Image: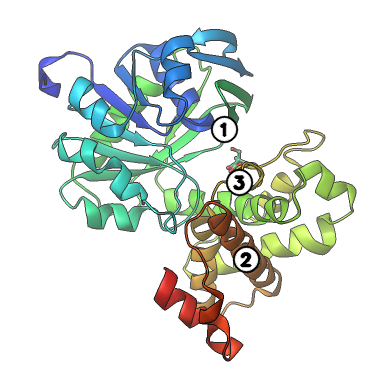
């Protein structure tokens, strides 16, 4: 392996080749200020031979597109193209999956001692497990506002690639290198003609909460009822359901000292007007894949409970979606129920399930 320092261009590894990861790879490759390696775990044969077909609101129509390097696993990437300067994590963050994000990226982090880990992921509470798993690495927090979906070799990128990047820790508790690494990453990611937009964000905590105003409400409800956002709204739910649920997210954020900009509610209610857009949780549910339920809704709900915030709408949505997630897990064979275990008092079923099957 060549040491990262012996090449002039920084090496960036992208783990997660869905809609977000692929467009990040495209932004970085177009800019050509770094060497880009993309891990493509499913569809490796397809992508390594044919590349992607991409329909992007920013980059136009591309066929047979590939980044500099494509790897079939994180270990393969580390062995053939590492060590890396940056590890950009764009995988779904599903702590209740059979393998966590920390476990997925470990082979690359362990073989890239100087690497900076950038979490370009939805939701809340994604940083802490990373700090714990990799205490010697700088972990940065990124929020993407892109609208982009991957389907079997094709990427449909409907919304521009806008990224907010920062250190999740409060000022005064930040890593000494965080500012300079953020600036360096921005310089390799930002296209000179402003095709994409990446900015240093001094308050990523607030930006994460504000994105949750959308994700905790639209991702969850669309996944629950299997309808895109416009189809929800045709049912006249903006005032009775969507707005009050979004206000619950703002109240939870307030309980941890984060004042969200209230105008985001109207902005997000109308951001997709007419687009018939299905957010990622809805797409995952349709594909029979696990959803990012815990980081999008579970973690905010735990904070609400701890801080005594009333969340009548979100609580119901969370309970119902836990059952959908359970169904997907069972369908995927993550557990096999033995009905003999559930013959007694139903008050005990959750504990029995937790003890025997989780
Ligand atoms: C911004 C948006 C709505 C689109 O990528 C998203 O975060 C999601 O679908 O999860």
For residue 267, above or below residue 17: below
The N terminus, quarter of image: top left
- Element carrying mark 1: loop
Which quadrant of the frame does ligand 1 lie within?
Answer: top right
Would residue 337 appear left or right of 229 to someone viewing this image? Answer: left
Of residues 72 and 357, the one drawn nearer to the viewer in this rendering: 357
On the image, numbered disc 1 is attached to which residue?
A: 146
Would residue 193 appear left or right of 277 to someone viewing this image? Answer: left
Write the residue at 60% across / 44% down. Answer: 284
Write the residue at 61% across / 47% down. Answer: 281
Write the residue at 72% across / 37% down. Answer: 277
Residue 12: quarter of image = top left
Whether the residue carrying mark 1 lies under 8 Å from ligand 1 is answered with yes
- Element carrying mark 2: helix
Mark 1 or mark 2, which has the lower sequence index? 1
For residue 272, above or below residue 71: below
Near mark 3 (Cα within 10 A), the count class, few <14, some 14-19 or many ≥20, is: some
On the image, numbered disc 2 is attached to which residue?
A: 323
Spatial distance from mark 3 to mark 2, Cα to Cα? 14 Å
Whether the residue carrying mark 3 lies under 8 Å from ligand 1 is answered with no
On the image, numbered disc 3 is attached to which residue?
A: 288
Mark 3 or mark 2, which has the lower sequence index? 3
Of residues 357 and 58, the one drawn nearer to the viewer in this rendering: 357
Spatial distance from mark 1 to mark 3, Cα to Cα? 23 Å
Question: Is there any visible trace of residue 255 in the rendered image?
Answer: no
**How far across and down, in percent of the image, does residue 128 sit?**
32, 58
């Amino acid at each position: 392996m060549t040491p990262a320092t012996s090449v002039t261009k920084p090496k960036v590894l992208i783990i997660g080749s869905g809609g977000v990861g692929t467009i990040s790879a495209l932004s970085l490759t177009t800019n050509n200020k770094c060497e880009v390696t993309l891990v493509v775990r499913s569809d490796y044969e397809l992508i390594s031979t044919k590349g992607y077909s991409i329909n992007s609101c920013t980059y136009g129509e591309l066929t047979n597109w590939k980044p500099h390097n494509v790897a079939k696993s994180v270990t393969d990437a580390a062995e053939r193209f590492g060590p890396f300067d940056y590890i950009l994590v764009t995988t779904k963050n599903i702590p209740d999956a059979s393998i966590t994000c920390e476990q997925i990226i470990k082979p690359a982090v362990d073989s890239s001692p100087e690497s900076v880990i950038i979490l370009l992921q939805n939701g809340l509470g994604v940083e802490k497990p990373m700090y714990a798993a990799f205490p010697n690495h700088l972990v940065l927090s990124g929020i993407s506002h892109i609208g982009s979906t991957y389907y079997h070799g094709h990427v449909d990128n409907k919304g521009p690639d806008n990224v907010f990047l920062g250190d999740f820790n409060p000022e005064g508790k930040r890593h000494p290198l965080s500012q300079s690494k953020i600036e360096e990453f921005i310089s390799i990611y930002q296209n000179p003609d402003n095709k994409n937009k990446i900015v240093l964000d001094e308050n990523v905590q607030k930006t994460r909460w504000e994105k949750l105003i959308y994700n905790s409400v639209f991702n969850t409800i669309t996944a629950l009822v299997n309808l895109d956002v416009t189809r929800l709204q045709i049912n006249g739910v903006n005032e009775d359901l969507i707005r009050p649920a979004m206000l619950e997210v703002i109240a939870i954020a307030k309980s941890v000292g984060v004042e969200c900009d209230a105008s985001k509610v109207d902005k997000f209610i109308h951001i997709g007007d007419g687009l018939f857009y299905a957010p990622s949780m809805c797409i995952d549910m349709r594909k029979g894949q696990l959803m990012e339920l815990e980081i999008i809704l579970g973690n905010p709900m735990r904070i609400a409970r701890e801080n005594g915030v009333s969340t009548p709408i979100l609580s119901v949505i969370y309970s119902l979606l836990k059952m959908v997630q359970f169904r997907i897990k069972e369908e995927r064979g993550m557990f096999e129920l033995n009905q003999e275990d559930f013959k007694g008092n139903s008050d005990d079923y959750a504990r029995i399930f937790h003890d025997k099957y989780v």
